[in-house]
Image (cartoon, helix red, strand yellow):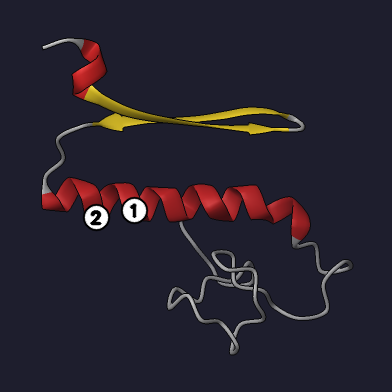
């Protein structure tokens, strides 16, 4: 089997550069869950520079960028919550 079939790949071209993501094509249920948890962590890391307390008066959900309490994504991650990175 070629490497092309072993991995999925997606690329997003941004003004600042290119973002790439690669994952194994075949994942078990537990591996898919673990990957989703890790991607949520990556989203929090991407959002951190935008969530300085002097720039934002309300606590925002890291996933959907809405004020927590009005969050519709079901995740309710906020920068003020404690996470093990």
Contact check, label 1 and label 2, Cβ < 8 Å: yes
Label tally: 2
Residue drawn at (43%, 78%) of the image: 74
Q: CA distance from mark 1 to mark 2?
A: 5 Å
| Residue 12, quarter of the rendered image | top right
What is the x, y in percent for residue 29? 13, 52
Residue 83, visible in the rendered structure: yes
As displayed, is residue 63 above or below residue 30? below
What is the x, y in percent for residue 57? 83, 79
Q: Residues within 10 Å of mark 1 (few under 14, many from 20)?
A: few
As displayed, is residue 3 above or below residue 33? above
Q: Which element is circle 1 on? A: helix
Judging by the rendered image, the residue that carries numbered circle 1 is: 36
The front one of 2 and 82 is 2
Question: Which residue in the rendered view is the most extreme toward the right?
Answer: 54
Judging by the rendered image, the residue that carries numbered circle 2 is: 33
As displayed, is residue 10 above or below residue 83? above
Q: Residues within 10 Å of mark 2 (few under 14, many from 20)?
A: few
Q: Which element is circle 2 on? A: helix
Residue drawn at (15%, 52%) of the image: 30
Q: Considering the image in quadrants, where does the N terminus appear?
A: top left
In this rendering, position of residue 40 left or right of residue 6 = right
């Amino acid at each position: 089997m070629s490497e092309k079939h072993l991995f999925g790949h997606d690329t997003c071209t941004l003004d600042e550069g290119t973002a790439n993501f690669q994952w194994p094509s075949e994942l078990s249920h537990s591996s898919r869950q673990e990957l989703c948890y890790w991607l949520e962590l990556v989203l929090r890391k991407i959002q951190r520079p935008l969530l300085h307390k002097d720039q934002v008066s309300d606590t925002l959900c890291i996933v959907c960028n809405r004020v927590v309490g009005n969050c519709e994504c079901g995740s309710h991650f906020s920068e003020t919550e404690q996470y093990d990175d």
